[in-house]
Amino acid sequence: MASAEPVTSDALEAIAAAVLLPVIREATAAQAVAVAERLSDAGIGVVELTATTAGWPDAVAAVASNRAMVVGAGTVVTAADAETAVSAGARFLVSPYPAPTVRAVAARTGVPFIEGGFTPAEVADAAGRGAAKLFPAHVGGPAMLRSLLAVLPGAKIIPTGGIRLEDVPLWLQAGAFAVGVGSDLTSAGDIESRVRGVVDAAGIRR
């Protein structure tokens, strides 16, 4: 169950302020860095770079060198990848499912870990340490998030997986701490315009 005094950090505060957590999953490190730069130009100051990208530690290090960006490493499921991510400059770690070995590295290094889960028990366990990733979120939809928050009031839950940009306001209305969005946000075109559309639709003040 979520703790009475959830863990907070600069990284989690940045994610909450951004509202959108872009999940960058590209074929190469260079492509991932290019997308991160476009997001930065659009006014988004936090990104998650996945460990499924070839050369992802280089991408994390490159984005981390931009002091205007808070970069995290996603799809981190082993202690080795967690260590590599932290060494490269990741300010937070994310897993798609419970990952005890990553949890141990995060606890030792003090880097926030947004641990993934889908069942109420998994989400409650992760949220009790700071923030939880609800994955794959599209399966249960915003109604599932509402049900979780009914028994975990105040929990920081970040739904991710199969979420369309146009549905972000629905997730925020359901109580999401932030919303993870992939290609629907990071694809080619005017990212700033797409972000503005979400902000306006959700009534967010920035």
Image (cartoon, rainbow, N blue to C red):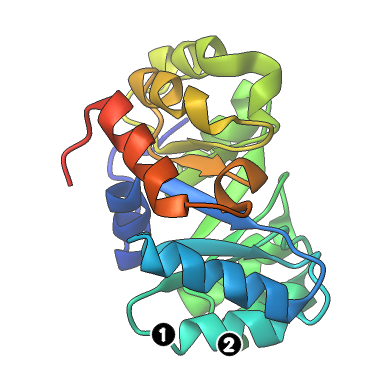
To which residue does mark 1 refer? 66
How packed mark 1 is, by other alpha carbons closer than 10 Å (few <14, some 14-19, many 20 or more), is few
Comparing marks 2 and 1, which lies closer to the viewer? Answer: 1
Q: Residue at x 73, y 64 (%)?
A: 101
Q: Can the viewer see residue 153?
A: yes
Q: Residues within 10 Å of mark 2 (few under 14, many from 20)?
A: some
Identified by mark 2, the residue type is Ala
Depth check: give the residue in front, 203 or 114. Answer: 203
Q: Earlier in the sequence, mark 2 or mark 1?
A: 2
Q: Position of residue 156 (x, y in %)?
A: 40, 38
The quadrant in which residue 9 appears is bottom left
Depth check: 10 or 64 in front? Answer: 64
Above or below residue 171? Residue 143 is above
Q: Is residue 32 left or right of residue 5?
A: right
Residue highlighted by disc 2: 61
Q: Position of residue 6 (x, y in %)?
A: 33, 46
Q: Position of residue 188 (x, y in %)?
A: 62, 55
Residue 8 at least partly seen: no
Q: Position of residue 22 (x, y in %)?
A: 53, 53
